[in-house]
Amino acid sequence: MHDPFSAVRRYDPRAGTLSGAVPAERRLRELAGVFADDKAFAAACAAGNPLVYTVASAEPADGAGDLHYGIGTLYPGRVGAEFFQTKGHLHAMRDAAETYIGLRGKGLMLLEDERTGACTAQPLEANGIVYVPGFVAHRTVNTGNEPLVYLGVYPARAGHDYGTIAEKNFKQVVVERNGRVEVLARADVLASLR
Amino acid sequence: MHDPFSAVRRYDPRAGTLSGAVPAERRLRELAGVFADDKAFAAACAAGNPLVYTVASAEPADGAGDLHYGIGTLYPGRVGAEFFQTKGHLHAMRDAAETYIGLRGKGLMLLEDERTGACTAQPLEANGIVYVPGFVAHRTVNTGNEPLVYLGVYPARAGHDYGTIAEKNFKQVVVERNGRVEVLARADVLASLR
């Protein structure tokens, strides 16, 4: 007999794992074009290929009212002055939102509205919830010293569009400067590197 | 200028609170018809009107791809042999699912498919995730000694239908018997009470 119910999952807010899900791994050399500082990126890749983040997802069903979810673990680290960050994405179904639930660590969610160009950086950290509206590109940045772990819940039909970000990137860059976390305009960072 | 972004929220997995949200309170006397044992319910109501659960919700936006979410806190307690439980609901938009993320405590989620009558009880507890598919009535039960705290994320358009449950109730009843948690058929429990 067909069981209409999905298996219960276990998540580990420290390790950033999800039972029954094989995590996708993103290592540094896969993140070409993400960081503003090309020279620092090349140097970091020459020195090694560290794990930057993992995402483990569950896709219980695919109907119009269904939801998918995943747990992300973004490791602490830097490329030059820039903190480790995810590629970032828009949803293929542009109006699909995503609710991010912070479980561990300290970071920022970069948000950029594709329609207006409006952008902001919101804290994403343990015990915080960031709501990503539709049409808003989003990228997480780990500004702390331990893994940043979070759950993301989104409509099953959302899909992922990485290509738009790969082409346009984000306007904001998050760096460490004099021991402080600063959110800078990419254009300014690029100019300073020239 | 219109800010397209929502405020970041803070949630407390111990206290079951959500910043910027006033919790709705459900006290025992509001739960008439929920428990199988009418006499035990009347006696418990005569003795007091304890807080059974609270729900604090966030509704950042209402579009087709948007999400709402809430934090539920179900206190430990019993009415006769039956554990404290929520009213339970279906979604008004029947195909809307809900993802429940357990934060604290130990309990069960009663699930009942409105289309087939299939039912089950899944563990809902700290570090567990229960997926409630569309068309499935769901009710949480606290089988432990501390508050059961969980987040629920659902499509903004889901809506809540409490009336169907108020009329039909759930087929399963969760009781403590000889120090053990048992999931029984309501029909059998009602027969034994006669």
Image (spheres, coloured by chain):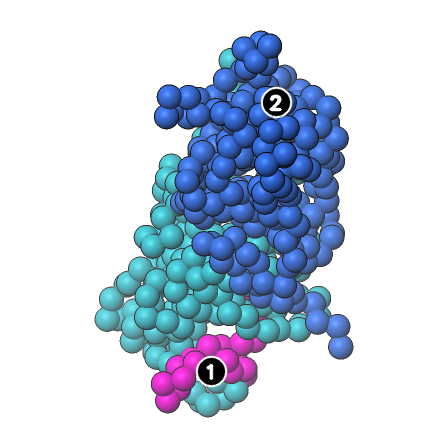
Chain colours: A blue, B cyan
* Residue B26 drawn in magenta: no
Is residue B77 shown above or below B37? above
Quickly name the residue at label 1: B182
Pointers 1 and 2 in contact (C-beta within 8 Å): no
Q: Which residues are magenta?
A: B164-187
Q: Residue at x 62, y 73 (%)?
A: B119
In the image shown, does A84 or A22 lie closer to the viewer? A84
Amino acid at circle 2: Lys
SS under mark 1: strand
Residue neighbourhood size for the residue with mark 1, other residues' Cα within 10 Å, grouped as few (<14), some (14–19), many (≥20) = some
Residue B192 seen in this snapshot: yes
Residue B93 seen in this snapshot: no
Q: Quadrant of residue A38?
A: top right
Horizontal arrangement in the rendering, residue A173 relative to residue A62 (left or right): left
Residue A171's tag is none
Position in image of residue A120 (x %, y %)? 51, 23
Residue neighbourhood size for the residue with mark 2, other residues' Cα within 10 Å, grouped as few (<14), some (14–19), many (≥20) = few
Same chain under badges 1 and 2? The reply is no
| Quadrant occupied by the C terminus of chain B | bottom left
Query: What subunit carries mark 2?
Result: A
In the image shown, does B35 or B68 lie closer to the viewer? B68
Q: Residue at x 56, y 34 (%)?
A: A85
Quickly name the residue at label 2: A39
Is residue A163 shown above or below B122? above
Which-is-in-front pick, marks 1 and 2? 2
